[in-house]
Amino acid sequence: MITTLRIVHLLSSMVWVGGTVALVFVGVPAIRNLEGEARATAMRTLGRRWRPLGWSAMGIAIVSGLWLTDLHGGFDSGAYSTDFDRTLMLKSVLVVLLVAGALFHDYVLGPRLQRELRGGDAAAPATRRRLVVVGWFTFALTILVPILGALVLGDLI
């Protein structure tokens, strides 16, 4: 059971991380070369196509991670007593921040920027800057969380 859960957890995490890396370094830069409505349409389409895959992978990673945590005693009363527990707790906090940041990016700032651009709102540049900052923050967490996962796994082996 644990081996199967680890495989599911790793594969779903790989989809989230790999997809995010592809978006950040391939998809978004290619779309930036477009202008006007073509750019907006391409960005919106990319986001809408990625979300079901990415968010499903994230959800599966979270559920399998929680299940693995339970199987390894991570929810026992002795939390924080070992390096494993402390690293796992830090990883969990960062996952919560990652999910909150990604939700804010995808479902608040992204749609707000689209509305502002369509309406010619002067606030669009400020919203774009916020979107970029939140995007890079969540990207950094997307890279950091699996590193912490490898450290946690190292404590188990």
Image (tube, grey):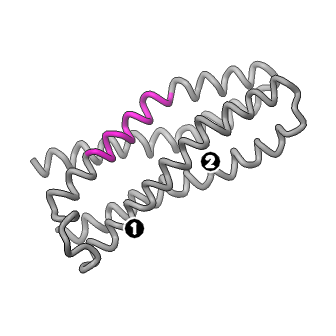
What secondary structure is marked by label 1?
A: helix
Residue 77 percent location from the top left of the image: 19, 72
Packing grade of label 1 (10 A; few <14, some 14-19, many >=20) is few
Measuring 81% from the left and 23% from the top, which residue is drawn there?
Answer: 118
Report the front residue among 141 and 23: 141
Quarter where residue 15 is shown: top left
Packing grade of label 2 (10 A; few <14, some 14-19, many >=20) is many
Spatial CA span between label 2 and label 1: 21 Å
Task: Check if residue 133 falls in the magenta segment.
Answer: no
Quarter where residue 88 is shown: bottom left
The prevailing secondary structure element of the residues shown in magenta is: helix
Measuring 39% from the left and 62% from the top, which residue is drawn there?
Answer: 147
Measuring 76% from the left and 27% from the top, which residue is drawn there?
Answer: 115
Quarter where residue 150 is shown: bottom left
- Point out the frontmost of discs 2 and 1: 1
Q: Earlier in the sequence, mark 2 or mark 1?
A: 1
Residue 16 percent location from the top left of the image: 42, 42
Q: In this picture, is 111 found above or below 130?
A: above
Residue 144 percent location from the top left of the image: 46, 61
Task: Check if residue 59 falls in the magenta segment.
Answer: yes
The quadrant in which the C terminus is found is: bottom left
Q: Which amino acid lies under the numbered mark 2 shown in the image of this protein?
A: Gly
Q: Which amino acid lies under the numbered mark 1 shown in the image of this protein?
A: Leu
- Which numbered dot is residue 90? 1
Report the front residue among 27 and 40: 40
What secondary structure is marked by label 2?
A: helix
- Name the residue beneath numbered marker 2: 135
Examine the rendering and report whether any part of residue 39 can be seen. yes
Magenta range is: 50-63
